[in-house]
Amino acid sequence: MSATSVAVEPAAADRRVARRVARLQRLATLLATGAILEALGIAALSAIGDGRFAMSADLPTIGFLGSIVLFPVVGALIVQRRPFTRVAWIMIATGLGLGMGLLLFGYGIVGVPPGRPLPLALDALVISQVFFIPSIGSGAAVLLLLFPTDRLLSPRWRAVALIAVGGAVLYDVGTILHPGTIGNDTTPGSPNPLAAPPAWAAAVDFMAVAGNVLVTAAIVLAAASIVVRYRRAESVEAAQIRWIALVAGLAAPAFAVAALQVHPASEMAFGVGLVLLACVPLAIGVAITRYRLYDIDRLINRALVYGSLTAILAGVFTAAVGLAQRLFVATTGQSSDAAIVLTTLVVATLYAPLRKRLEAFVDRRFKYDERRFGAYRDEVVRVLGVIDPARAAARLVGEAVRELQASGGAVLDADSRPVATSGSWPVPPVVRLPIPGGGDRLAAILVGPRLDGRPHDPRSVAQLQEVVGLVSAAIRLHARRPPS
């Protein structure tokens, strides 16, 4: 197809694409409904059980059930607008997998002795373990690799996705075939019905450990990829990434405090971390629809400062209490409440200087723009993004590639040189639209093929033509303004 014509496909192809879109939208709705039913089934098992699988209205329960429901529901909502978005389908799979794992786990706990036996309860208990690492670990890694553009930064990052998937497979195989009894306090002495022969025990255990290490490494590398993406991102994409950074900046210190085993603070922190995990799909949904929160940089900055401060002080408090109690026991032969009082005074003394040092450290590496005119400034930037030729070109091609789900695109000047590009470039141009009134700097916009290989929807091309006309009119109007 010539690059000088608009790609308008036959009506039959258009109808096939429309039917495929409708099927995907119905499937997403059905899967989201299934996730809601999983959450209801988990609650029902808790209600009818003998107390070994008890759930209450606490933070961990809210976090688990919220993740099971919100990931698929928000993913399904995104699919209604962008049915081929991989991030949305990964979100749906994450929630469904987590729900299936918890549902099978609850069924297994309720259905094994000493309670009333249920069919295949022990098998369900074993199989439930294969859903958690792929859903939470591998799912998180792939989401970070693709968010927010739905594409990898480059082909070499595909290896990280393969590590995440391969690690999950190794862990699942090692868990399913683990010899001996099932290690759960509520099912003491229950043998694994799917256990491998004893001769394979060492190899099976190694697979589980290696899989866990690989998935953890994939998450770390995926987090590094989103940092690299943020450093290269344009304004809109950077704003989308900040939404995830806000939730992660709050969740990471919560899980850090939970790992310290400082009771009851750790239990509370674990629940808070799970609730924040359930907020991830909300952050993704808002970011993908490109709504922005003014001065969100400041929130992330403060979350990093005070989250780190909380984790450090909790660690100091735990270590100091243990050391002081040992000294009292060695000196007096018994523990003393004075150790807690003295440690509290030490922690209070450390608070102010430690906070200042953390603020300086975080500000050097994550400096936010402290603006008093955030909303007004953002409005001015949006206006310049339409009337300033350079900004208009970058914004136009970025929106065109995003909305048409294309592999790449460019705005050309009168000499056919790219003024602004987005996605992969160069790519075979299948859509070319002139920009009337754009002058020598903005002559035409080219859009490459779709990421999924399907033809461009003629309605989307027509809508892009309308937007190009509006941008052209804004530039012409700005060019005609009388000199000041």
Image: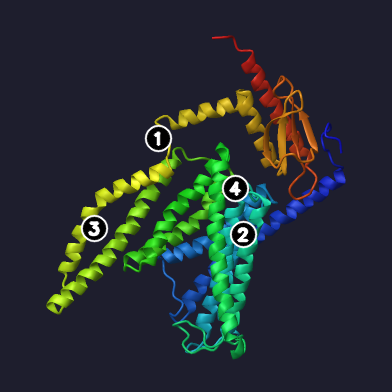
- The residue beneath circle 4 is 148
Callout 4: SS: loop
Sort mark 3 into few (<14), some (14-19) or many (20+) by Cα contacts within 10 Å: some
Residue occupying the point 65% across, 21% down: 475
Considering only order in the chain, which callout, 2 or 4, is on the residue closer to the N terminus? 4
Name the image quarter holding the C terminus: top right
Considering only order in the chain, which callout, 1 or 2, is on the residue closer to the N terminus? 2
- The residue beneath circle 2 is 160
In front: label 4 or label 3: 3
How far is mark 2 from mark 1, CA to CA?
Answer: 36 Å
The answer to the question of whether label 4 and label 1 lie on touching residues, with beta carbons closer than 8 A, is no
Q: Is the image coloured rainbow, by chain, by secondary structure, or in one colour? A: rainbow
Amino acid bearing label 1: Glu
Sort mark 2 into few (<14), some (14-19) or many (20+) by Cα contacts within 10 Å: many
- 423 or 39, which is in the foreground? 423
Considering only order in the chain, which callout, 3 or 4, is on the residue closer to the N terminus? 4
Q: Is residue 173 above or below residue 341?
A: below
Considering only order in the chain, which callout, 1 or 4, is on the residue closer to the N terminus? 4
- Which quarter of the figure has residue 97? bottom right
How far is mark 3 from mark 2, CA to CA?
Answer: 41 Å
In front: label 3 or label 2: 2
- Which quarter of the figure has residue 10? top right
In front: label 2 or label 1: 2
Residue occupying the point 23% across, 58% down: 347
Q: Position of residue 221 (x, y in %)?
A: 55, 57
- The residue beneath circle 1 is 370
